[in-house]
């Protein structure tokens, strides 16, 4: 029996058409390109159905509403397909692949999110390989995770970041090795793949509209700016700090703004601006001052994953204390558990 894969086509470069104004998503155009690819009809390929979203989006226009639509769509078709491919723009792909694992609780089938840097309609493109390999992985590999496949790397979705604006190797997961490497063979690193729990069932966790934000520290950042960001109704903030999570501890007004917000119950999660490594707020005085102000460590979570996790936890209706505890616990493979 040929396997069946559901393709959720949300937009992105992969299906775009060239116009005078630049590339734009165009309804039905991706399907035309796929129709013209005989390799997709080869017996070694799974059968697939393409569901095009309306409107198709450049992923710069994505919001958590679209994350919910994708999660629901997968939930609605879950029992009828062996795996899922989500075609998505690269710009915010890592945010979507960070959010979906929290929303697809009990996932037992592969969800492979992919796209391309050059559309399928161009002679030289990376979409063809990304699409074909994603379909093969979604159909034939028992990986019960949301993954991002791009440029020969299969990454855990909630660990992925976009690292190149124009290269074909556009994504990486700097704090965990790829779940798979694709060259002559598709090699899966099975030791890293999460094991499905027995009898687990998919539950789609919807997102509400909590007020969360992200702020990147920079030399000279004013305490007023920080205080303004932290004003009600903000519930959670990803603070992208320096190195192992440090910030300007000589700036009393800055620390006071943080303390005032955390004492009101705002959850401030410290993630590093570095691509690789983990936050450790005990290493420097410039870190422990933030901890004393009530900031919690995001350890080695990406800022994308921390933001998605805040959306998810506050949507679950948890009180700030519970959100803080859960932020520091590994829920979907988004952080490395130490000690
Ligand atoms: N702007 C495009 C998008 O994110 C870029 C891409 O798909 O590569 O939709």
Image (spheres, rainbow, N blue to C red):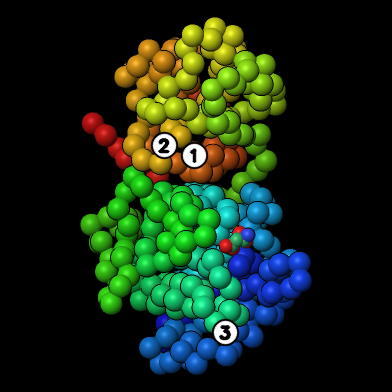
- Quarter occupied by residue 91: bottom right
Q: Earlier in the sequence, mark 1 or mark 2?
A: 2
| Residue 303 numbered tag | 1
Q: Where is residue 338 in the image (x, y as percent from the top left)?
A: 27, 34
Q: Which of marks 3 and 1 is nearer the N terminus?
A: 3
Q: Residues within 10 Å of mark 3 (few under 14, many from 20)?
A: some
Q: Quadrant of ligand 1?
A: bottom right
* Image quadrant where one finds the N terminus: bottom left
Q: Nearer the viewer, residue 77 or 150?
A: 150
Q: Where is residue 319 in the image (x, y as percent from the top left)?
A: 55, 27
Q: Which residue is drawn at 61% across and 34% down?
A: 213
Label 3–label 2 contact, CB within 8 A: no
| Residue 34 numbered tag | 3
Q: Earlier in the sequence, mark 3 or mark 2?
A: 3
> Which residue corresponds to mark 2?
274
> Is 298 left or right of 251, judged from the image as shown?
left
Q: Where is residue 230 in the image (x, y as percent from the top left)?
A: 64, 22
Q: Residue at x 37, y 62 (%)?
A: 154
Mark 3 residue CB less than 8 A from any atom of ligand 1: no
Q: Which of 293 and 222 is in front in this view?
A: 222
- Quarter occupied by residue 302: top left
């Amino acid at each position: 029996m040929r396997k069946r894969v559901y393709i959720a086509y949300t937009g992105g470069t992969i299906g775009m058409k060239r116009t005078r104004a630049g590339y734009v998503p165009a309804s039905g155009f991706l399907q035309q390109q796929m129709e013209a690819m005989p390799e997709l009809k080869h017996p070694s390929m799974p059968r697939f159905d393409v569901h095009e979203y309306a409107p198709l989006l450049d992923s710069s226009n994505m919001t958590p509403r679209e994350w919910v639509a994708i999660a629901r769509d997968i939930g609605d078709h879950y029992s009828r397909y062996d795996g899922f491919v989500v075609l998505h723009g690269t710009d915010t792909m890592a945010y979507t692949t960070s959010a979906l694992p929290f929303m697809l609780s009990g996932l037992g089938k592969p969800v492979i999110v992919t796209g391309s840097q050059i559309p399928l309609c161009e002679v030289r493109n990376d979409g063809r390989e990304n699409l074909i390999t994603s379909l093969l992985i979604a159909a034939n590999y028992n990986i019960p995770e949301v993954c991002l496949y791009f440029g020969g790397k299969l990454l855990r979705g909630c660990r992925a970041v976009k690292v190149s604006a124009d290269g074909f190797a556009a994504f990486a997961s700097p704090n965990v090795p790829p779940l798979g490497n694709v060259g002559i063979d598709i090699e899966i690193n099975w030791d890293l793949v999460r094991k499905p729990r027995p009898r687990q069932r998919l539950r789609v966790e919807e997102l509400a509209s909590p007020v969360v934000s992200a702020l990147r520290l920079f030399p000279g950042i004013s305490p007023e700016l920080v205080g303004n960001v932290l004003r009600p109704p903000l519930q959670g903030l990803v603070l992208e700090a320096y190195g192992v999570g440090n910030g300007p501890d000589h700036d009393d007004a800055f620390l006071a703004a943080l303390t005032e917000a955390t004492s009101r119950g705002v959850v401030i999660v410290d993630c590093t601006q570095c691509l690789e490594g983990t936050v450790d707020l005990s290493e420097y005085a410039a870190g422990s001052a933030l901890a004393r102000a009530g900031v919690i460590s995001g350890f080695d979570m990406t800022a994308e994953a921390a933001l998605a996790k805040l959306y998810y936890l506050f949507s679950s209706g948890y009180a700030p204390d519970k959100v803080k505890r859960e932020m520091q616990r590994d829920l979907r493979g988004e952080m490395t558990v130490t000690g």
